[in-house]
Image (tube, coloured by chain):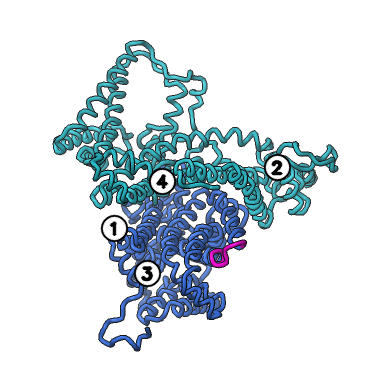
Amino acid sequence: MSSADMPKNRPVEASYGKKIMRDVFSRLGAKLGLAWIAIIAFAAVFAPFLANSHPLLLSINGEVSSPALRFLTPGDVTILGVFMCVVVLYFLHLSFTKNIAVLAAVGGGIGLLSIIFVNPLQLTVYEQYRINEVAENYDWVIRAPIPYSPKDYLREQGDTGLEAPLSDEHRVHLMGTEENGADVLSRMIHASRIALAIGFIATGIALFIGVILGGLMGYFSGIVDMIGMRLVEIFEAVPTLFLLLIFVAFFERSLYVMMIIIGITGWPGYARYVRAEFLRLRQQEFVQAAIVCGLPLRSILFRHMLPNGMAPILVAASFGVASAILAEATLSFLGLGLVDNPSWGQMLNQSVQSSTFNWWMAAFPGGAIFLTVFAYNLIGESMRDAIDPHLKHKS
Amino acid sequence: MSTYIIRRLLLMIPTLLGITLVVFTVMASAPGGISAQSLVEGQNLEPQAKKALEDYYNKLYGLDSPAPVQYLRWLNNVSPVGFTFDEAGNLDGFSLFKGSYLGKSFLYGRPVTDLISERVPITALLNIISIPIIYIIAVAIGVRAATQRGQSFDVGSSVVMLSFWSMPTMLTGVLLIGFFASNQYWHWFPTSGLNDRVALDMVFLPHWGSLSDILILIFSVLFATAFFIWMSRWSKPHARAACFAVIGLLAGFFMADALPEKEQGLITSLMLISLAAALFGAVAYAQYSVLRVFFMGLVGLGIGFIIAAYFQEGPFVRGFLLDRAWHLVLPVICLTYGGFAFLSKLTRTALLENLLSDYARTARAKGVSDNDVLWRHVFRNSLLPLITVSASLLPSLLGGSVIVESIFSIDGMGKLAVEAVKGRDRELVLSLTLISGLLTLLSYLIADICYAIADPRVSYE
C-alpha cells in the first residue's frame, strides 16, 4: 500500500526500527548509558577548551588574542567540524545513507583543508602564561576550566611530581598528577577521544567484514558456507587477546593500526550472527521475490535482507564497542599500546610502572574504562530486551 | 557417534593449519619480521661477532630461507608424520612415526616443550580452582534470580552482574594489589608469584607447636562459625542487621587501625567504618538465606582464626599448602568475577524458559512441591546451555589469565605468551598458537559430546 492510499488523518505509523529505538531508550539503563557516553563525547569534542594550558582568551595592553585557538591541531579542527556537521544534520532529518555520505564528505573535506591550512606553532612553551600571569603582564586572562595540557609537566614550578588529588595549596589538580607532574584529569579528557574512536571505528571495521562475509555465507550456503565457517573457526579458535598481541607486537604502534587490528580480530562473531539471520531469511517470500525480479546481488543482500536481520547485529555491535575499548585498554596496559599520547589503558599501565601505589592514577582512568564499557553494555542489554519477542510475549 | 567424533577430529586438521598459517603470515609480513638481524638487534657487539651470531641463527632456525619454506619446514617438524633429514640437512626419507618436535625457543634457548610443560600446570591450577567457583556462584545467583523474576533480587543482581562483567580485570587487579598487598595500605596478601621462597623448604601441611594450639584453633573456629551461622538464621531481619552492623563497625575500626600511620586520618576511618557497617548490615538484612549463611559463615571463620591466633603460644609453620592458597586468593578473585557474571545471566535465561514451560506447570499441578519442580525437573533441563558454554570458557580463561598472570607476575602460559610475542620468538608463538587452538577445538568437541550425553534428543548420527 503506498502512502497515497492511506487516509490522510491517520498518523503514519513509526517504522519498526524507530519503535525499537524508542523502546530501548525509554529504559533507565539505556538512558544512563547514553548519558555517560554523551559526557565522554562532549569531553572528546571540546577537549582543547576544557583542559588546556593555553589560555582561552587573554589581553596584553588592550590587544586581545586566543592562544588556545592558535594552538589547535588539524585533528582538533576536524573533530570540531564533524561535530558541527552532526548537529546540523540532526535538524535536517535526511535519510540515513544521505547522512552518512554528507558526514563522510564533510569530515574528509575538513580533514584535508585543516592539514593544509592549520599549522600550529611547533614550539609550545606552557610556562610563559603562568610566568606572565604572576608578573601581571596581562590585563585580564580567561583560562580553561582545567588549566593544564595533558603534556604540561609544570617544569617551571620545580616542586612537581606525584601529587594526590587536591593536596597542593598552589595548584588545583582535581584528580592529582602523575609521576612527571602532568594533570591526570587533563590527560583523561584528551584520552577520551581515543576510547571513543577505537570503539566506533574498530567495531565498524569488524561489522563491515562480518556483514559481508556472513551475508555471503548465509545467502549462498553450501560450499561457500562451509569454507567461510572454517575461516570463522580459525579466527575463533585462537584467543582474541593472543591474536591481538601478535598483530600489535609485530606491526608499528599507531592508533590507526590498532583500530584496524581490533576490527580484523573482531569480525567472526558478527559473521556468525549475520549468517544465521540470512540462512533464515533466504527462505522467505520477499527474498524469493527479489531474486525472481532479477535484482542485483548487492541490492538483494543489503537493501532487502540486511535491514530485516539488523536487530541482533546491532545488539552484538553494542557489546562489540565495549569489548573494543577493553581490548585497546588491555593492549595499552600490557605495554603494547600508543607510545606518545595518553590513553586510559596506558595511564593504568603508568600506575603499575611507578614504584609506589597511587590510587588516583589507577582508580580514575580505570574507572573511566569501566564506566564506558558498562554504558555500552547497558545499552546493549536494553536493546536485547527490546527486540526479544520471547520476553515481551510472556511479561 | 564414533564416526562423528572421527570426522570432527579430521576437520580439526585444516582448521589448525589455517590458524598457524594466519599467525605465521602475520609474523612474516610484519616490517622487520623475523630475521636474524631483528634477533641480534640491540645487542652491543662487534660487527664480526654480530655477523657470526646472525649466521648462527640463520643456520639454526633457517631464518634466511623464504617465508613459505620456513613455514613448511616448521610444519614438517611439528607434524608427527613427515620427512626426516640427516645430520647435514639432506632429505633422508619419509617416516610415519617421526614424532613431532616443537622447536627451540629463540628467547630462552630451550626446547619449547620444556618451557610449556613447566608453565601449563600453573595456568591449569588457576583454572581448575576458578571454574568450579564460577559455576557454583553463577548457578546460585541465576537460580535465585529466575525464581524471583522481576523482584528486587533479580533486578539488582542483573545490574551488579553486568557491572562485574564490564569491570576490566586490570583495574581490579591493580586496585586489589594496591590496597591489599602493598605495604602502603593493608599488607594482607603477597604482591606477586605463587609462593614465597621460604615456603619451598617448608613441609606441605601447616604445623603447630603443641596439641593444645590445634585444639584451641579447632574449637574457636568451630564455635565462631557455628555461632555466626546460627545468627544468620535468626528470623528477625532488623535485629540481625543491627547486630551485624555493630560487627561491621568494629571490623571497619580495626581496618582503619591497621593502616600505616601515613594513611590514617579521621575521614578515612569514618569512611571505612561506615562502609563496613553498611555492607555487613545490608548482607544481614538480605532475604536470600544462602548468601547470608555463606557470608556470615565466612566472617565467623575469620573471627575464629583471629581468636585462635591470639591465644596461640607455640611456633606455627604455615606450610606449602597454606602459602600457596594465600598467594592464590587475589588472582582467583580476578579470574572468577567476570566469568560468573556472564554465566549467571545464562543460567537465569535457561531456567526462566523451563520454569514457564508446560511440563513444569503440569508437575506443579500434580502437587509436586516448588523445590522439587525447580531442582528435579527444571534445573536438569536448564543445564544444557551451561554445558555448551563451559567449552568456550576455557579459551577465555586462557586469554584472561594473560592479564592476571602479568599483573601478579605468575609464570604461567599467559605470561609466557606475552613474553614470546614481545620477544618475537617465532617457535614459541607458533607452538602456543597451535596448543591453544588445539585445546579450544577439543573443548568444543567435548562440549558437543557432553551435549549429546545430557540430552537424549540430540544425536549426531
Dot 1 corresponds to which residue?
A: A394
Q: Position of residue B64 (x, y in %)?
A: 78, 50
Dot 4 corresponds to which residue?
A: B338
Which of marks 3 and 1 precedes in the sequence? 3
What residue is at 43 percent from the left and 64 percent from the top?
Answer: A314
Q: Which element type, helix, strand or loop, lies under badge 2?
A: helix
Q: Which element type, helix, strand or loop, lies under badge 3?
A: loop
Q: Is residue A86 placed above or below B58 in the rendered structure?
A: below
Q: Which element type, helix, strand or loop, lies under badge 1?
A: helix
What residue is at 59 percent from the left and 41 percent from the top?
Answer: B2
Point out which mark residue A137 bears: 3
Disc 2 crowd, CA 10 A, few/some/many (<14, 14-19, 20+): some
Q: Are marks 4 and 2 on the same chain?
A: yes
Residue A117 among those drawn in magenta: no
Residue lying farthest front?
B366
What residue is at 32 percent from the left and 63 percent from the top?
Answer: A35
Q: Are marks 4 and 1 in contact (CB under 8 Å)?
A: no
Q: Is residue A143 placed above or below B141 in the rendered structure?
A: below
User: Which chain's residue wears label 2?
Assistant: B
What residue is at 57 percent from the left and 66 percent from the top?
Answer: A220
Dot 2 corresponds to which residue?
A: B78
- Mark nearest the camera among 2 and 1 is 1
Which chain is painted in cyan? B
Q: Is residue A91 placed above or below B223 in the rendered structure?
A: below
Range covered by the magenta-colored residues: A216-223
Which chain is painted in blue? A
